[in-house]
Image (cartoon, rainbow, N blue to C red):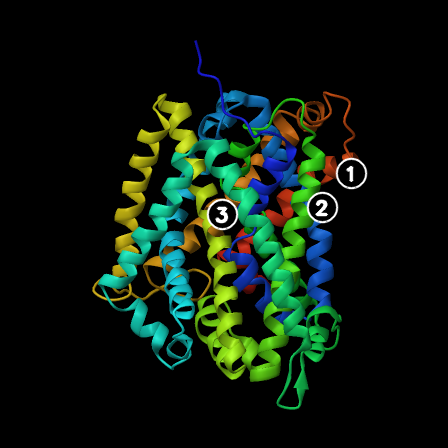
Amino acid sequence: MSKKRDTFTGTLGFILAAAGSAVGLGNIWRFPYLAAKDGGGTFLIIYLVLTITFGFTLLVSEVVIGRKTKQSALTAYGVINSKFKWLGSLATIVPFIILPYYCVIGGWVLKYFLVYITGKGTNAARDGFFGEFVTSVPQPIALTVAFLGATMIVVFLGVNGGIEKMSKILMPVLLVLVIGISIYSITIKANGRNGLEGLKILVIPNFKGHSVNDVITIVMDAMGQLFYSVSVAMGIMVTYGSYIKDTDDIVKGVNHIEIFDTLVAFLAGVMVIPAVFVFMGEEGMGASGPGLIFEALPKTFLAMGKVGYVIGTLFFAIVLFAALTSSVSILEAVVASLMDKFNISRVKAVIIESVAALILGVIVCLGYNVMYINVPLPNGTKAQILDIMDYASNNILMPVLAIGTCILIGWVAKPDFIIAEATKNGEKFGRKKLFVVMVKFVAPILLLLLLLKSLGIMDLILK
């Protein structure tokens, strides 16, 4: 007799857990940079359009696959069609690769949170502080262990007692903090500049000087950001979908996830861009990723004076919460797959995956010192171990997985497979015709273009 599957207590639990997964580091350290780089409001408009078309299609497909099969990613695809079992393997490999380096970055965030909460934010703004920290040996590893340990505890506690309970506490707190800092950011005045001027950079479309190639780049940037911002092609949404009750409204839940994720991404831009603009000018907004979070923003907080310590502490609390809710979902995707495939306990699955993640996480940490490498990637960038893992998972495997999912749903199982499950209790399926067109034609083409861009082929074509 099969063991009864855990479920979320209701639609709200699913929405907050899924939103917690979607609202991660990508929203906070990549969205503001891309918005500033790609014409502000121009990027926002394209991102919003892609959210309600491309994002909706992939989200609802994966969530329905999970609920229909009552299986996590590793086994769910094979239940639909045995020839597509390979998609399940791919959907498990992706979070397996991501978790170790995500926990390493989570350790970095924990470091900065501790620095600010202990009143030592001045140190964080010092030139070379971040480089000295990541290239040291014991501390990054210890903080990675601490962050992974926190992730393990939540997943150990299960769907209701861990994931859902954490999400119901952290997500409202995160939203309140984001809104509070955003309001403060747009009210700042210094250096002859004010936060509202920075806000205009974010929200007002800038169409000047955009060639056809520039527009294509903006669309690809927006799609790439959305792609992993909503946590698709990582096995997560299939897994979370398998925990949804048959009576819950899937489409309504997905709509709320879209709104929450887009709102937090936009507010991340409002938090970051006006403040950086006021204290560092437009040249300060050129940083992205770790450079933005761990170098540019600490200097911005320092320039704020005493209030900067408070803002810095709250900001890194937000980033820490976002990183933790995402890492929990990544670990859960692998753990659930191990439980479903090998019929082992949650505790055993968590330990197995966490040990593997710890070993790889230590290697990632050492990749900044004793195991440092610098190899070229197909997209023209130079990379060390963390970048290689990120490139392989986000830029190659995830687009391939998403393309395969579109083929499975659009042409093999057919779109009615998704629509019928989502409406079996009489629910409405808004954007039904759009969904069919997107999953069969538009999404696969866009994903192929994204893959070509990641491989550097798109740049060669556009030259």
The quadrant in which residue 222 appears is bottom right
Q: Residue furthest left?
A: 370
In the image, residue 283 above or below residue 38: below
Q: Could you tell me how far apart the alpha carbons at marks 2 and 1 are, in whole angstroms?
A: 8 Å
Taking the spot 48% from the left edge, 29% from the top edge, the residue there is 72
Whether residue 456 can be seen here:
no
Q: Position of residue 197 (x, y in %)?
A: 71, 79
Q: Which residue is mark 1?
A: 431
Q: Looking at the image, which residue is at 26% across and 63% down?
A: 139
Q: Secondary structure at mark 2?
A: helix
Q: Earlier in the sequence, mark 3 or mark 2?
A: 2
Binning the other alpha carbons within 10 Å of mark 3 as few (below 14), some (14 to 19) or many (20 upward) gives: many
Tell me the residue that label 2 is attached to: 53
Q: Quadrant of the N terminus?
A: top left
User: Which is more foreground, mark 3 or mark 2?
Assistant: 3
Q: How crowded is the residue under tag 2: few (<14 C-alpha within 10 Å), some, or many (20+)?
A: some
Residue of label 3: 325
Q: Where residue 324 sits: x, y (%)?
A: 45, 50
Q: Residue at x 57, y 49 (%)?
A: 171
Tag 3: amino acid: Thr
Task: Determine contact: label 2, label 1, CB under 8 Å.
Answer: yes
Question: Helix or strand or loop: what does disc 1 sit on?
Answer: loop
Q: Is residue 413 above or below residue 236?
A: above
Q: Amino acid at mark 1?
A: Arg
* Badge 1 or badge 3: first in the primary sequence: 3
Q: Residue furthest top?
A: 1
In the drawing, does residue 205 fall left or right of residue 216?
Answer: right
Name above or below for residue 213 compared with residue 193: above
Please name whichever residue, 75 or 173, is drawn nearer the observer in this view of the structure: 173
- The x and y percentages for residue 78 are 49, 24
- What is the distance, in whole Å, between disc 1 and disc 3 at their CAs? 29 Å
